[in-house]
């Protein structure tokens, strides 16, 4: 099965676009991480994963027909021939099933390329904006499968709240999509500490294959997820924040352990990253229940409950609540 086959299973034959399509998708932060593919072209994961939506932080995308492909991100022109431009237009033309030129205007409320999953919200917004432009009528499973073809973690950005990405077993990936787990509970907090908005040097696709191919430690990763995913799902349903936080932090650090054990090593952490982790641990020792998670980049996301708002803000004045 190819991405084109998947497109043809889920979408009608190519047609003329409408006048304009617009959509917003939230970014998401994984509590149990996706790290490793079983199929590169279809972006099928080795394991399941579970995330929480970042609500207002994400991507708004407007797409309209044009004389030639054009891309504007946060008000600035980006060449459709750039790496990011090519990746997006290849994806949009895949969804079209043909090559009508398009103008894309995208606004991110999150820094790009800094491990804050802006590609997840961008590809999810792209699917939904194309759905509006072409008048398709998709369910969340189809949206999720299509978004996955753009970026794996994007398949979780088509739903709000806590979301699980089922790894699935179909070789074509038709059962590898997001499913809702629960709405976010009102006291639950995720804040993003932007320690560095420098573009990451090694993207997640290259990072995953390097880790799988060179780190013997990676063999233990599916076992880690097998333990953590059901534990986090249960903790979300029971609103058991302690289990959720402990498991999520350990899961993120285990993922980074496999990255560090790759060759050449993948050390996404900056000095600020480590200092922040130690600060989180010191806060916990003082009785403030706050946990950390981090993706393929230097930034740390904090997980805590409303009762710790003041203590977290005092310790991290730059914490931007989501
Ligand atoms: O969707 P990708 O290919 O950018 O992969 C994202 C991988 C992590 O952010 C590191 C983990 C995750 O589950 O989001």
Image (cartoon, rainbow, N blue to C red):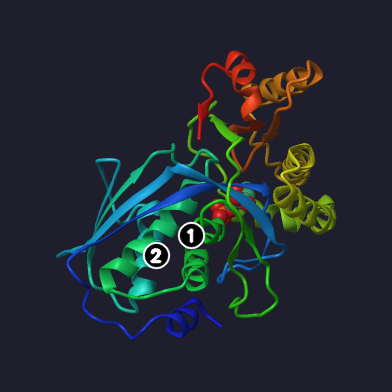
130 relative to 206 in the view: left or right: left
Residue 206 figure quarter: bottom right
Secondary element at tag 2 = helix
The quadrant of the picture occupied by the N terminus is bottom right
In the image, which is nearer the foreground, mark 2 or mark 1? 1
Q: Quadrant of residue 189?
A: top right
Tell me the residue at 62%/22% (across/down): 272
| Extreme-left residue of the structure | 67
Residue 69 seen in this snapshot: no
Taking 314 as reference, is 228 left or right? right
Q: Which of 180 and 155 is in front in this view?
A: 180
Percent position (x, y) of residue 41? 55, 70
User: Can you see residue 214?
Assistant: yes
Determine whether label 2 and label 1 are within 8 Å by CB: yes
Judge whether 148 appears above or below 114 on screen: below
Q: Earlier in the sequence, mark 2 or mark 1?
A: 2
Q: Distance between the residues labelled 2 and 1?
A: 9 Å
Quarter where residue 89 is shown: bottom left
203 vs 166: above or below: above
Q: How busy is the neighbourhood of tag 2: few (under 14 within 10 Å), some, or many (20 plus)?
A: many
What residue sits 40% from the left and 80% below the top? 11
Q: Name the residue under label 1.
A: 158
Residue for badge 2: 127
Place of residue 251 in the rendered image (x, y in percent of width and height, measured from the top left): 76, 45
């Amino acid at each position: 099965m190819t991405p084109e086959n998947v497109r043809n299973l889920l979408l009608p034959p190519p047609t003329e676009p409408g006048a304009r399509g617009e959509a917003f998708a939230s970014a998401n932060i994984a509590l149990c991480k996706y790290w490793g593919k079983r199929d590169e072209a279809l972006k099928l994961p080795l394991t399941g994963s579970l995330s929480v939506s970042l609500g207002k932080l994400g991507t708004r995308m407007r797409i309209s027909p044009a004389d030639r492909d054009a891309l504007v991100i946060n008000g600035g022109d980006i060449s459709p021939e750039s790496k990011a431009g090519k990746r997006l237009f290849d994806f949009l033309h895949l969804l079209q099933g043909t090559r009508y030129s398009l103008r894309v205007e995208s606004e991110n409320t999150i820094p790009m390329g800094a491990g804050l999953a802006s590609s997840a919200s961008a590809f999810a917004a792209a699917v939904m904006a194309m759905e509006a432009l072409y008048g398709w009528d998709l369910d969340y499973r189809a949206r999720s499968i299509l978004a996955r073809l753009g970026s794996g973690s994007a398949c979780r950005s088509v739903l709000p709240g806590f979301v699980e990405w089922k790894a699935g077993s179909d070789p074509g990936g038709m059962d590898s999509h997001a499913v809702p787990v629960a709405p976010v509970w009102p006291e639950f907090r995720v804040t993003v500490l932007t320690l560095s908005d420098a573009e990451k040097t090694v993207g997640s696709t290259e990072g995953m294959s390097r880790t799988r191919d060179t780190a013997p430690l990676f063999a233990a990763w599916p076992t880690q997820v097998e333990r953590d995913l059901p534990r986090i799902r249960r903790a979300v349903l029971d609103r058991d924040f302690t289990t959720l936080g402990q498991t999520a932090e350990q899961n993120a650090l285990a993922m980074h352990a496999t990255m560090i054990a790759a060759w050449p090593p993948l050390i996404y952490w900056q000095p600020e990253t480590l200092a922040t982790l130690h600060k989180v641990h010191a806060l916990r020792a003082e009785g403030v229940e706050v946990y950390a998670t981090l993706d393929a980049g230097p930034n740390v996301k904090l997980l805590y409950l409303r009762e710790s708002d003041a203590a977290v803000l005092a310790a991290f004045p730059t914490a931007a609540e989501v």
